[in-house]
Amino acid sequence: MPFDWTQEQHVTRARFRDIGAEIAIAVEQDGRTPAEFDETGWTRLGHEGLWDMIVPETYGGDGHGWWHFSAALEGLASSIRRPALLLSVIAQAGMVRALERHGTAAQQDRYFGSILRGELSATAIAEPGTGTDVRSIATTLVEHGDGYRLTGSKFNIAHAPLARFILVVTRIETPGRRNTALVIVDRDQPGMTVAPPDRKLGLNDLPTGALHFDDCPITRGQLLGEPGAGLGTLIDIISLGRLYYGLVAAQVTAPYLRDAIGYCRERRSFDSTIDAHQYVQRRLVDLQIGIERGTWLARGALAQLLTDHPQALMTCSVAKLVGAQDLVDGAIGLVRLYGSLGYQAGPVAAFASDALGFMSVGGTEEMHRKNIFNQMMRAG
């Protein structure tokens, strides 16, 4: 794995760090509570060439690749302050990987163009009764004439209220034990109903919602990968998202740490500024440790994933698990550090609410621990 960015990647990271800061300022100057998708910020990222980096050159990309994209994401996360737009970027990156590695030429031609135009996608896995336990999902794909029919429900799906196309995880009856299929469904799909946006504790600017499928007609050309082999394909796709959740969880704390250092240098207590107190120093150091730990874990996971390392799936889960826990611990630590100021409605309290969302986004702690345990047993 690279232990430093190339000169070009350093420039890209710095450029997207500045872009993130400008997006944060624009949201603040709007004077609005982030309660809806930041369309302006999303459009800006597309115009700045974020998607060009990872869309294949054949379909309009610029050939920079995943490490370059990761440098941009790291820079963006280090300054943007609110993580919702970052989670949207991660979701879209997962769709690029899905199409790049498993899509047909027709699917790539159609949907890479949509991504470059800034059209939002979604990946629908979770269901009300099963969460993200793919082996237990009830949504079904049944053969019908020359194609299929899709029936079932999904919930808590990022971008569901806005997405132009959706990758749906479903069951399908095939010979043997493999029974998972992936299908790409367009927004205007007959038989699909989009529920109103969810109301959440935090991350309100990441629109989530439910999807319902009632005998939706699906053509064979809408299948992503081989029918029945969807579980392996899905794991390959979402592993990228897991490590990026870890990267974002680490870096999004950075501007709050900078603010906290400034606050501690000015805030006086017991005849000295509070940065002289060891318990305050420990809180600040723990924040920095979380940033470093999460960043390097995510980079290592990316190196493994891109080279098909046998431990890649485990490391991706570790990166997500560690990043989420450090983020939540750090956000709560900031509330404690600021005292009543941190608890009052404002940027620190909002950040803490958003941070709690990382305990479930991309899979719960229990799910990732189970995945890590299973990988340990296979390796042992």
Image: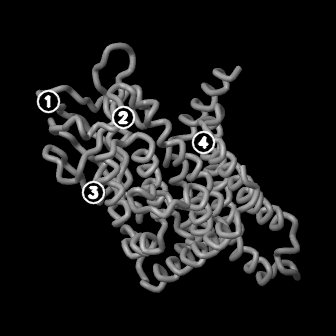
Could you tell me which quadrant the C terminus lies in? top right
Q: Give the image location of residue 329, x and y in percent.
A: 67, 55
First in sequence: mark 2 vs mark 1: 1
First in sequence: mark 4 vs mark 2: 2
Foreground pick, 183 / 204: 183
Residue at 66% across / 46% down in the picture? 303
Compared with 86, 293 (above or below) is above
Is there CB contact under 8 Å for labels 2 and 1?
no
Residue that numbered label 3 is attached to: 164
Q: Give the image location of residue 353, x and y in percent.
A: 52, 61
**Which residue ends up furthest to the bottom in the rendered image?**
29
The crowding category of the residue bearing disc 4, from other C-alpha atoms within 10 Å (few below 14, some 14 to 19, many at least 20), is many
First in sequence: mark 3 vs mark 4: 3
Q: CA distance from mark 1 to mark 4?
A: 37 Å
First in sequence: mark 1 vs mark 3: 1
SS of the residue under disc 2: loop
Q: Is residue 221 visible?
A: yes
Residue that numbered label 2 is attached to: 225
The crowding category of the residue bearing disc 2, from other C-alpha atoms within 10 Å (few below 14, some 14 to 19, many at least 20), is many
The crowding category of the residue bearing disc 1, from other C-alpha atoms within 10 Å (few below 14, some 14 to 19, many at least 20), is few
SS of the residue under disc 1: loop
